[in-house]
Image (cartoon, rainbow, N blue to C red):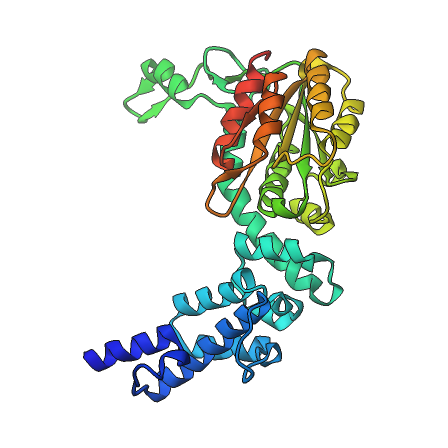
Amino acid sequence: MAERLKNRWRMVLGRYCEAQFSANLSELETAQDGALTTLYQQGLAARGHKVGGTLSASQLHGVEWISEVERLFPKSVSETLIEDAVNHFQLTELLSDPQVLEKLNPNIQLLRTMLRIGAQHNPKVRLQVERIIKQVIDQLTQKLRPKFEQALRGRRNSANSHPTKTLANLNWRKTIQANLKHFDPDTQKVAFEKIYFHGREQRSIPWRVIMCIDQSGSMSESVIYSAVVAGILARLPAVRLHLVLFDTSVVDLSEDAQDPVGVLLASQMGGGTHIGKAWRYAESLVTEPKRTLVLTVSDFEEGGSPSALISQAHQVIQSGVKMLGLTALDQSATPFYDGYVTQGLQKAGMTIKACSPDHLADWLAGHMGEQG
């Protein structure tokens, strides 16, 4: 047991501890140690640290190294090592190899890294990137769509009759209860003389929702969730959606909003932040201020004048437009944002919140219901 523990410490500390104590590594442990050394020494080199001359960045050949890691370690460990190589050690050259991408498990961390390095614009890996984006988007949409549909479609009203009598709106409970008196014991059947349907509360005028999404370098995960949310909102009859992505320029992707995969493929992560420019474009889309909501997803680190931005928000809000802000969240779901700017915007009347996508639907529904 002591020998096994000693070998584990040797593998944790690496070859630099050999002068302090020697370990008798097995053939498997030696191979595992070599794979770990290759990864973490090159990771240090990628971060600018000086390392020994026996290893160079060219030694980590994507497919061969991943195949070796998968052979040497349990699945949970190999997945962690591969994610470390891509996400934490800046070995993003792995993502330029289609065979490497084919082996990677699609998840939001991987997709975030791919967007940050612009992998979606690399023709050589385009098909694999599309596959990964689609799988991640499908997973997130399946999780979030029911929340938004329930919150924003309108609640069923069993007291009223729906003008369109469809099976989807059939009020089974009320229909059965009302017709039980027509039960025939001989045939064991109920004669349904009257059928009841659910009513659904509908707003007469759809809300115009303008989503302004910051696509500067720090916002990759927020852009992913925003694309999913936009795809859901674009399909709801109670919402007329405009999707605007911005950094120091503004791109209107409203026509593609129903396709989150296309939105992410078109995104250009990086650059600065000019929220005021995006808001000026949003103002040009407003036709009925009191039925318009501008939702800005950003870290609010404005590259332009903060005081001008705050003044601009005040003017838009005074016109009757609702302005909501959603702060960026890091990998641990901790919000990060410019406190000075957000404080000024809140004083101007803008509502700013840090919340997960799970709670965004109810938050939006609450604000859209205030004048509904």
Residue at the (48%, 31%) spot, across then down: 359
Q: Position of residue 279 (x, y in %)?
A: 74, 27
Residue 182, located in which quarter of the rendered image? top left
- Quarter of the picture containing the C terminus is top right
Percent x, y of residue 340: 59, 28
Q: Position of 80 compared to 267: left or right?
A: left
- When the figure is inspected, residue 337 is found, relative to residue 124, above or below; the finding is above
Question: Which residue is found at the position 74% from the left and 15% from the top?
Answer: 288
Placement of 308 over or under 69, stated as above or below = above
Quarter that holds the N terminus: bottom left
Identified at 73% across, 67% down, the residue is 124
Give residue 188's quadrant in the image. Answer: top left
Is residue 197 in view? no
Q: Nearer the viewer, residue 120 or 246?
A: 246
Q: From the top left corner, tell me how far across and down residue 151 is, in percent.
A: 51, 26
Residue 113 location (% of width, % of height): 60, 56
* Residue 156 at least partly seen: yes
The number of numbered discs placed on residues in the rendered structure image is: 0
Q: Is residue 50 above or below residue 294?
A: below
Q: Quadrant of residue 317?
A: top right
User: Residue drawn at (41%, 79%), measured in percent from left and top?
Assistant: 16
